[in-house]
Amino acid sequence: MRRVGWPGARLAPAAVCAVLCLAAASCSSGGGAASPPAHPSHSSGQPASGPAAVAAVTSTWETFFNGAVPIPRRLTLLQDGQQFAAFVNSQAKTPLGSLVFAATATVSSVKLQPPGQASVTYTILLSGRPLEKNVQGTAVYIGGSWKVAVTTFCGLLHLAYGKSHLIPATCGG
């Protein structure tokens, strides 16, 4: 991602990060690598392939980045989301966190990449205006559901916070 050239642009990456944080869960627990995606399961839940899977990924992404959706619901849409709950909840109490609740995302493309992954191109909007365009992310198919990948979430955290002590250990902070 690149920094946006509007007043307060230094907050733009942090807002992107916080959107994910507020959509995710807590990074208060110890480190470790992200869980590998599960192999697609066709037994229940969302479809793993085809146009219905693309629609499911799009819906997951747009819900995850919707500040009007309660944090606990958004955490269910992040791979290993409960690892980030404390971090997200603490950030939600900050002035930046309140700004982030106004953020949304629109998905411009989803490319399914077996086994159980998808590349997502999306735009983050703040007050209906593009904050970051053509952002690249990854979705993973786990337990019959599409999730925002931890790698995507952590990448945004690193962009927003740099080498800050605020970055959860799970993200290599």
Image (tube, rainbow, N blue to C red):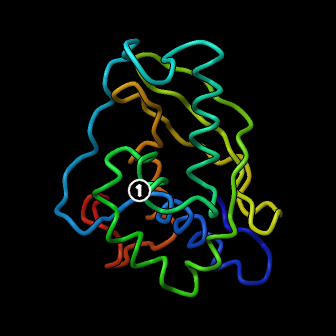
Which quarter shows the N terminus? bottom right
> Between residues 133 and 70, which one lies in front from this camera angle?
70
Residue at point 72% right, 50% down?
A: 123
Residue at point 74% right, 37% down?
A: 108
Q: Position of residue 103 (x, y in %)?
A: 68, 64
In the image, taking residue 53 as reference, residue 91 lies left or right, namely left
The kind of secondary structure element at disc 1 is helix
Q: Quadrant of residue 57?
A: top right
In the image, taking residue 31 as reference, residue 59 lies left or right, namely right
In the image, residue 125 above or below residue 150: below
Q: Which residue is mark 1?
A: 154
Q: Quadrant of residue 149?
A: top left
Q: Position of residue 100 (x, y in %)?
A: 62, 72
> What amino acid does circle 1 point to?
Cys
Q: Position of residue 68 (x, y in %)?
A: 64, 63
Residue at point 70% right, 32% down?
A: 109
In the image, residue 141 above or below residue 167: above
Which quarter shows the C terminus? bottom left
In the image, taking residue 30 as reference, residue 56 lies left or right, namely right
Q: Quadrant of residue 27?
A: bottom left
Residue at point 31% right, 79% down?
A: 165
In the image, residue 95 above or below residue 6: below
